[in-house]
Amino acid sequence: MNRKPIIGITGAYVKHNDYMEGVYVHHDYHKSVVANGGIPIILPYINPEISLETLGLCDGIILSGGEDVDPKLFNQDPHHQLGPTTPERDLAEIAIVKYALENDIPLLAICRGVQILNVALGGTLIQDISSQVSEPIQHSQKIDRSQDTHWVTISKNSRLFEIVGSNRVRVNSLHHQAIGEVAKDLRIVAQSSDGIVEAVEYNHPTTFTVGVQWHPESMASTNVEMNNLLLEFIKNSAKVMV
């Protein structure tokens, strides 16, 4: 029996009350990985060293959504609209990004994930779109996360275009931060109508490194274009299995 690829999903932080708090991953991540032939596991952010040890279990990595990124990591003071941050998670995920790129581990960076990918490689973030971008569209939707809310335009000269098969797609949108200055090792492959960076790809030869600002895992069950992104990522994870 052939083993299915194991997909490590980085965990966010949630606190229900004083007695219940810890690592959290939305179930859409689990469901979309399983639906496309993978086995999901959650990667807790204890420290960078332990995080790198857990990568030995993984054939592919999803950097999931969650808290804001600590602005000291890109040499900025906190904006007044900055939300909660988890510095331990930031450092663990930066270490994961660098290790994955150095070792050709397939990487799909989602929402906060694409932001930490950019920061890990030397880029910056817009800390609050609504107050720092002129005439922004609505990026933090007020309907179910499975529903699309705005268009993004995808570069035809990109892996993302090859995967989804269109240069203009509808996406969901659940963020108030976004990529600012793009890291030199990344290139922009999708944007929204207000100029916000919606997707990036790694410039150098690699197995699979794609980052998107939206949540394809929450649209995958009803949207073929979004599911194709998860499917291609997991196919690439299966290729590097040992």
Image: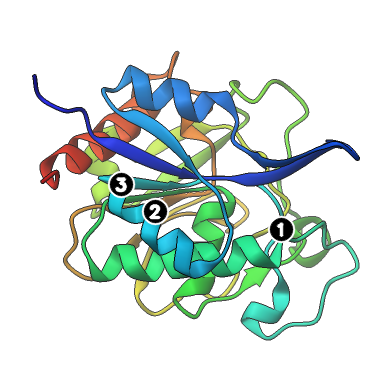
**Which picture quadrant has residue 131?**
bottom right
Determine whether label 2 and label 3 are within 8 Å by CB: yes
Task: Let me know if residue 138 appears in the view.
Answer: no
At horizontal 62% and vertical 60% (from top left) the residue drawn is 89
Position of residue 120 measured from the top left corner of the image (x, y, whole percent): 48, 73
**Residue 114 spot, x, y in % from top left:** 50, 56
Q: Nearer the viewer, mark 1 or mark 2?
A: 2
Tag nearer the camera, 3 or 1: 3
Label 3 CA crowd tier, 10 Å (few <14, some 14–19, many 20+)? few
Q: Where residue 63 sits: x, y (%)? A: 48, 50
At 78% from the left edge and 28% from the top edge, which residue is drawn? 142
Q: Which residue is mark 2?
A: 54
| Residue type indicated by callout 3 | Leu
Label 2: state its secondary structure: helix
The amino acid on which the numbered mark 2 sits, given as a three-letter code, is Thr
Please tell me whether mark 3 sits on a helix, a strand or a loop: helix
**How far is the residue under mark 3 from the one under mark 1?**
27 Å
Mark 3 and mark 1 in contact? Answer it, CB < 8 Å.
no
Q: Is residue 60 above or below residue 232?
A: below
On residue 68, the disc is 1
Question: Which sits earlier in the primary sequence, circle 1 or circle 2?
Answer: 2
Distance between mark 1 and mark 2 Cα atoms: 23 Å
Q: Give the residue number, with chain letter if any, for mark 3.
A: 57
Q: Which mark is residue 134?
A: none
124 to 157, vertically: above or below: below
